[in-house]
Image: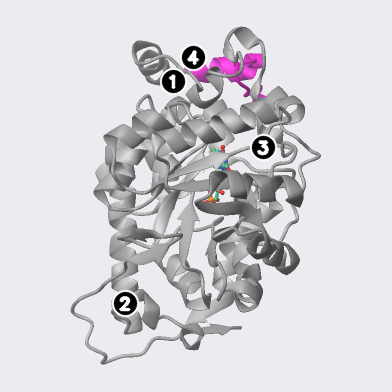
Amino acid sequence: MRLNQCHNFQDFRTLAQKRLPSPIFNYIDGAADDEVTYRHNTEAFDRCDLVPNVLTGVEDIDMSVTVMGQKLDMPIYCSPTALQRLFHHDGELAVAAAADKFGTMFGVSSLGTTSIAEVRKKFKSPQVYQFYFHKDRGLNKAMIESAKEAGVDVMMLTVDSITGGNRERDLRTGFSIPFRLTLGGLVQFAIKPMWGINYVTHESFKLPQLDEHVDMSGGAISIGKYFTEMLDPSMTWDDVAKMVKLWDGQFCLKGIMSVEDAKKAVDIGCTGIILSNHGGRQLDGSRSPFDQLAEIVDAVGDKIDVIMDSGIQRGTHVLKALSLGAKAVGGGRFYLFPLAAAGQPGVERALTLMRAEIERGMKLMGCSSVDQLSRSNLRFR
Ligand SMILES: Cc1cc2nc3c(=O)[nH]c(=O)nc-3n(C[C@H](O)[C@H](O)[C@H](O)COP(=O)(O)O)c2cc1C
């Protein structure tokens, strides 16, 4: 299979699986425990049907949205994800370049392999910095200040990862940073030599957001240890309220799922919340963000931008979320498999297909702009 034969999420996933050593493919594809939540995230969209209107005059479609003060040319953005240079040697720069071409937002993870300043310098499209809260308050402050200096548009604090999820596929393959592969895992790298050649002949792997502050080289601290030893499980709403003040700009919480927490986010001055279960990678058995969306939009949708991610694979999924009241949606694997499959051209193809699906869907729904989508366009079974 080649890139031009990829027509949907599953095609990109198949091509990524062919190209990647299996420990890396399974790191992207895997989720927590029995992966029940991972499966439910996408299935949730099938529990409701779109109800189109016709003959409304839809020759020009405007799918742009404004979210947390950022104008996006399409209503889906590339959610921050860790370690992108392992998936393709161009990593975050490939994704940022593609997002920039399509006028959408892109997030750099605290565990990103390219520096936020480098991405900011190269691309104009809205940039999010995904932040993990560390025990070391000095480190938090320094990281927030570097993000300010770099000119990041939106601060995104992930709140669903107070400890690492139980990713059993990674335990089986030995996937970790630095690599501690099992024998089976090592064999999987040996049978995908092109990945290895690209990996060693391109810029070396690093975690620039953290390298300045902690020694990630030489095995001093692994990603697993990062979650268990460096992140602060005692973090509370008071800590976040202080961070919101310190940032003094667009600030959202990623991983809010309850109405109670959504209201607290409003109270402490956040400008956005992202309903997310981290693509099923953290708390298995947790509800899908799509199922929880209406309740949260009803409670706080007039006070804060409500966004959702997890499980989005199709343009119609995006349209269902927007019809329920989401201001925009994020996606992870929808661009990660294409990145792994073919680098920047892969991500561009995924965004092209997604944009075409959204446009076609809006036309078939009789909506020429996103604000015309409403709950009257949806029926739950
Ligand atoms: C391989 C991978 C790495 C991720 N790394 C991060 C991360 O560093 N920080 C974060 O907040 N979310 C991270 N996420 C979660 C995504 O930002 C997003 O919430 C999730 O992928 C949405 O689900 P989807 O993949 O079904 O679209 C990661 C997801 C994947 C698949």
Disc 3 element: loop
- The C terminus - image quarter: bottom right
Q: Quadrant of residue 379?
A: bottom right
Rendered residue at 74%/51% (across/down): 237
| Quadrant of the image containing the N terminus | top left
Q: Amino acid at mark 2?
A: Ser
Foreground of the two, 101 or 39:
101
Residue highlighted by disc 2: 369
The x, y position of residue 312, in whole percent, is 49, 58
Q: Quadrant of residue 372?
A: bottom left
Write down the residue under mark 1: 192
The reply to whether discs 2 and 1 touch (Cβ–Cβ < 8 Å) is: no
- How far apart, in angstroms, are the residues tagged by discs 2 and 3? 38 Å
Number of residues whose C-alpha sits closer than 10 Å to that of mark 1, classed few (under 14), some (14–19) or many (20 or more): some
Farthest residue to the left: give it.
59
Image quadrant, ligand 1: top right
Mark 2 or mark 1, earlier in chain = 1
Ligand 1 closer than 8 Å to the CB at disc 4? no
- Are discs 1 and 4 less than 8 Å apart at CB? yes
Residue 381 seen anywhere in this rendered image of the structure = yes
Residue 133: image tag:
3
Start-end of magenta stretch: 171-191
Q: Which amino acid, by three-letter code, is at mark 4?
A: Ala
Residue tagged 4? 190
Q: Position of residue 4 (x, y in %)?
A: 25, 45
